[in-house]
Amino acid sequence: MSTSTGFDIRRIGGRIGAEVLGVTLADVDDPALVTDLNSALLEHKALLFRDQHLDDAAQLRFASLFGELTTAHPTVPSVEGQPSILPVDAEGTRANRWHTDVTFVRTPPKVSTLRGIVVPPYGGNTLIANTGAAYHDLPRPLRELADTLWAVHTNDYDYAAPPRNDKAAEHRKRFVSRKYRTAHPVVRVHPESGERGLFIGGFAQSFVGLGPSESRDLLRIFQSYVIRPENIVRIAWSPGDVVVFDNRITQHYAPDDYGDLPRLLHRVTVAGDAPVGVDGERAYVLEGDEAGHYTPAAA
């Protein structure tokens, strides 16, 4: 499919994901092109740009086309000298858990961009799931229940696996050095498209008003719809690739299937707003602060 500004979109998944052809990200400056790219992101949830070979400055510039940038992370250090770039490094904690970026704060990122720098010769893919499709897959009684629920998201919880090395242990210690607990609607209404999606993932640990046992069971049920194979696209990286995904209506996962091989991506995120539920209520802080140092566009 060709767009009005001359680039092509090729779907790479039935329900999520498209490759964008004919765009050099380092040169994007046409407002109409930016509008078309944003429309493509809203439709496909995740966009892949092959063989871009951006440097840090170009990635920052491209990400900023979608809005004001956050700093790298609320608790984890950035790339040295680049306060808005997070190194996603295999030597630290591997993100082999389904999650939406930074949902433990009140205003999680709007958009995440990833750039492949060092890629293993096998494995190391990124899986991205469409949580809007998951919501529509729910049987009506479960969908109506989800509409009423609020989930507690936190960066401070019991991890299932021990740290793999000293660097991973240090990363985990930094990750929880400032603790956050935030209540988000389980069903988030997308602020641009109006689409409803399940807003849960790895940082969602319980439901407001429910105990641990009921929360675990319900989270397992809802999450099982998110990670249905038909709702997922798998990105096989090559150095120089760039992936952009809508953090408001996706989850992602990086399988730990490449042994001790190096893998390095750089992540830049765009500031978002507080999620809104079907009743119009916004997310609210339970513990910690507004993370204004991380999300300059907090609303």
Image: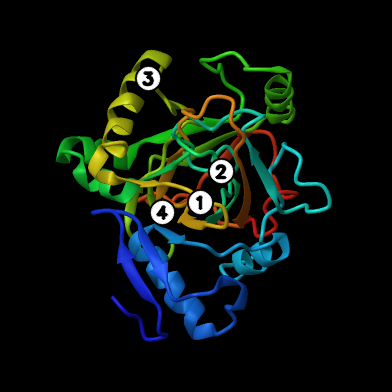
Q: Nearer the viewer, mark 4 or mark 3?
A: 3
Q: CA distance from mark 3 to mark 1?
A: 37 Å
Mark 4 lies on a secondary structure that is loop
Q: Are marks 1 and 2 in contact (CB under 8 Å)?
A: yes
Residue type for callout 1: Ser
Q: Quadrant of the C terminus?
A: bottom right
Answer yes or no: is residue 110 visible: no
Residue at 61% in and 24% down = 156
Vertical placement of residue 31 versus 38, above or below: below
Residue type for callout 3: Arg
Q: Nearer the viewer, mark 3 or mark 1?
A: 1
Of the numbered discs 4 and 1, the one sitting upstream in the chain is 1
Q: Quadrant of the N terminus?
A: bottom left
Q: CA distance from mark 4 to mark 1?
A: 42 Å
Which residue is tagged 3?
216
Residue at 54% in and 33% down = 95
Kindly identify which numbered label has been placed on residue 238: 1
Kindly identify which numbered label has been placed on residue 280: 4
Mark 2 lies on a secondary structure that is loop
